[in-house]
Amino acid sequence: MPHDTSEAITPAKPRSETRRPSFFWVLAVLILPIINLGMRFRFHHRERMPASGAFVLAPNHYSEIDPVVMGAASWKLGRAPRFLAKASLFKNPVLGWFLRTSGQIPVERTGSNGHQALRAAEELVEKGRMVIVYPEGSLTRDPDLWPMRGKTGAVRIALERGIPIVPAAHWGTQAVLPRYGKRISLFPRKTIDVIIGEPFDLSAYRDKPIDQAMLVKATGELMDAIAELLAEVRGEPAPAERWNPAAHGQKETGRLEE
């Protein structure tokens, strides 16, 4: 499989979003040297990353450091990363300020504010920006770190706003910070594989009434596409079905005892 094995500290073809002065430059100066010290990125199919325009990037999620890693990967690929993030993170005075200043979007786990978060994400895509949404909504419960059953927010945004959704997967962050781990390991330097998928085909769902059954079906297909990408970089087949926490007596949020 052809892929780029360089560390790609800067995009091969600089794009206007990362060249335009913004608060992301401050974050890049503060964070990227640390990232580059402890991790090297190996990109697969980097040409599939849309160079401009609004879209949803939907990656897998199995470590609490994933947003930092995918944020750095997105920047290296020429796009400024914006996330739907847990509202609790915004309560920290310092972290909350960074999140708000860089345009991240707080999401409440419960209550009516979740709908407001979707509206905020749509405002980002109306401005031609990328928004990163983890369809799983939490760290996967799958014991082998394969993507689990997804939630419908990513697909809903893509369908409601008529924008592409691009699946992605990464592998290697578990060596930096294990699932539910508390200690980050940067040495020896870790290799992070990041693979970008083709835009997910939503043509069968476009221009139709959006209901829960449609969203669940499309989300299941999206999670299968993410699992296939992860299988490609892991070099092993993905499970035929996505892990369902409810079927194993597990909650879908919060930490699991391992």
Image (spheres, rainbow, N blue to C red):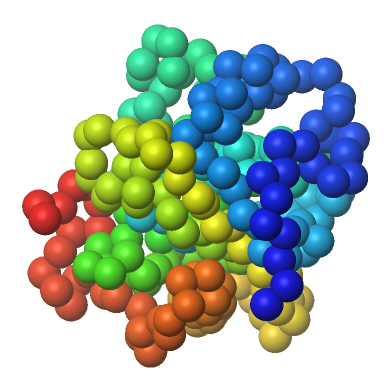
Q: Is residue 234 left or right of residue 254?
A: right
Q: Is residue 47 left or right of residue 187?
A: right
In the rendered image, is residue 154 in sight? no
> Is the N terminus in the top left, top right, bottom left or bottom right quadrant?
bottom right
* Image point (54%, 76%), residue name: 232
Residue 98 versus residue 208 in the image, above or below: above
Residue 87 versus residue 232 in the image, above or below: above
Residue 124 found in image quarter: top right
In the rendered image, is residue 240 in sight? yes
Residue 205 found in image quarter: bottom right
* Image point (27%, 74%), residue name: 244
> Is the C terminus in the top left, top right, bottom left or bottom right quadrant?
bottom left
* Front in this rendered view, residue 89 or 211: 89
| Residue 214 position in % (x across, y down) | 54, 79
* Front in this rendered view, residue 118 or 58: 58
Q: Which residue in the rendered view is the most extreme toward the front? A: 188
Q: Is residue 99 left or right of residue 20?
A: left
| Residue 220 position in % (x across, y down) | 47, 78
| Residue 73 position in % (x across, y down) | 63, 44
Q: Is residue 139 left or right of residue 25?
A: left
* Image point (43%, 81%), residue name: 236
Q: Tag count in the figure?
A: 0
Q: Which residue in the rendered view is the most extreme toward the top? A: 93
| Residue 89 position in % (x across, y down) | 38, 27
* Image point (36%, 78%), residue name: 242
